[in-house]
Image (cartoon, rainbow, N blue to C red):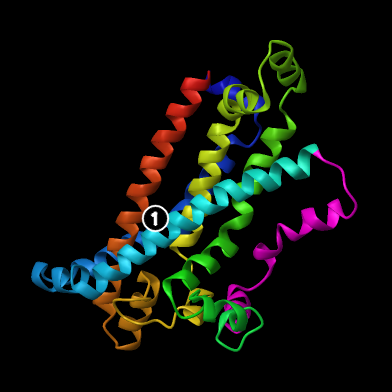
């Protein structure tokens, strides 16, 4: 079997070797070095760095804001992907290109734009702040910028699946008496659920590691608007490299655990659909 695969895929050995080298140099070795750096702390020092009130507040904000941003993008991304695939309208190509703007725009620029828009004297803030909506230097600001930076992942993940949907299935459901809601929930949704979960996971993972945009709009107030990546940088600026590595390891464990749970859910959804 191995010889057959090698004949079908020329350069199998070279490709496998390059893949393993790439994974080790860019992923596994840096993570191992990070863990080794954190392991130089005693357990009491590690606990003091990772489980103090400031760190726990940062973890809660990071995970909670990332989850909420991914959830919002799940709904908005599905709607936009559906419109881009199923409808024709003037400027569609421009609108489609704008979806990828967060990929090309530096996140620091996005943070500056959002902070200038939602401050008390900003274009939007002058109307929203009197109504009680704090879109800058607040937890709401963190969620807003995380929605922006992770937005394209859901759209680009779901869009090809919607394009491959067979319209005959929807017509058959309509002929059998199903209304639009029933057609969506019983015909369309089960088919695109695995793609939705994948898009959610990508958006969630992207939001967890975001730093550039959040640092400009959150105010970085400990216990209130400080996210875990900012806490890592704060430790580095204080020359507490081992403590920074410990916090990074804790964030890595939380992120990996969440992604494993999402992947298990995705596999369950695929098996159920099959």
Which of the two residues, 70 or 104, is positioned nearer the viewer here? 70
Quadrant of the rendered image containing residue 222: bottom left
Q: Which residues are magenta?
A: 87-116
Please say if 258 is above or below 117.
above
Q: Residue furthest right?
A: 90
Confirm whether the magenta stretch covers residue 76.
no
Q: Could you tell whether 258 is left or right of 274 in the image?
A: left
Quarter holding residue 121: bottom right
In this rendering, does residue 25 appear at all? no
Quadrant of the rendered structure where residue 100 is? bottom right
* Numbered marks: total: 1
Is 172 in front, or is 22?
172
For mark 1, give the secondary structure: helix
Judge whether residue 259 can be spotted in this image: yes
Image coordinates of residue 104 in percent, x first then y, are: 69, 67
Within the magenta stretch, is there residue 113? yes
In the rendered image, which residue does mark 1 sit on? Answer: 28
Left/right placement of residue 50 relative to residue 151 reads left
Q: Is residue 179 above or below residue 106?
A: above
> Relative to 256, is 267 above or below?
above
Image: 108 above or below 200: below
Look at 29% across and 63% down and name the residue there: 249
Residue positioned 70% across, 37% down in the render = 160
Q: Residue at x 48, y 61 (%)?
A: 207
> What predominant SS class does the magenta segment belong to?
helix
Instruction: Report the front residue among 114 and 120.
Output: 120
Q: Residue furthest front?
A: 131
Residue furthest out toward the left: 44
* x then y, percent, for residue 164: 72, 29
x, y percentage for residue 90?
Answer: 90, 52
Q: Callout 1 environment at 10 Å: few (<14), some (14 to 19), or many (20+)?
A: some
Image position, residue 144 (x, y; %): 53, 67
């Amino acid at each position: 079997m191995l010889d057959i695969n090698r004949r079908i895929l020329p350069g199998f050995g070279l490709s496998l070797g390059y893949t393993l080298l790439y994974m080790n140099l860019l992923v596994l070795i840096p993570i191992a070095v990070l863990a080794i750096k954190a392991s130089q702390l005693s357990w009491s020092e590690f606990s003091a760095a990772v489980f103090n009130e400031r760190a726990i507040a940062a973890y809660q904000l990071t995970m909670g804001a990332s989850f909420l941003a991914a959830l919002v993008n799940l709904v908005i991304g599905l709607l936009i992907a559906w419109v881009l695939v199923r409808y024709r309208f003037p400027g569609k190509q421009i609108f489609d290109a704008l979806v990828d703007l967060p990929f090309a725009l530096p996140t620091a620029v996005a943070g500056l734009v959002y902070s200038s828009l939602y401050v008390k004297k900003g274009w939007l803030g002058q109307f929203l702040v009197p109504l009680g909506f704090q879109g800058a230097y607040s937890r709401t600001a963190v969620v807003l910028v995380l929605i922006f930076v992770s937005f394209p992942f859901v759209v680009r993940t779901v869009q090809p699946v919607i394009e491959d949907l067979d319209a005959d299935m929807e017509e058959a459901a309509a002929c059998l008496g199903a209304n639009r809601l029933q057609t969506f929930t019983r015909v369309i949704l089960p088919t695109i659920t695995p793609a939705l979960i994948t898009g959610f996971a990508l958006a969630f993972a992207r939001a967890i590691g975001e730093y550039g945009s959040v640092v400009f709009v959150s105010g970085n107030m400990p216990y209130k608007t400080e996210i875990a990546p900012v806490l890592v940088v704060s430790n580095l600026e204080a020359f507490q490299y081992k403590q920074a590595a410990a916090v990074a390891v804790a964030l890595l464990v939380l992120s990996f655990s969440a992604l494993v749970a999402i992947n298990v859910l995705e596999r369950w959804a695929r098996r159920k659909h099959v």
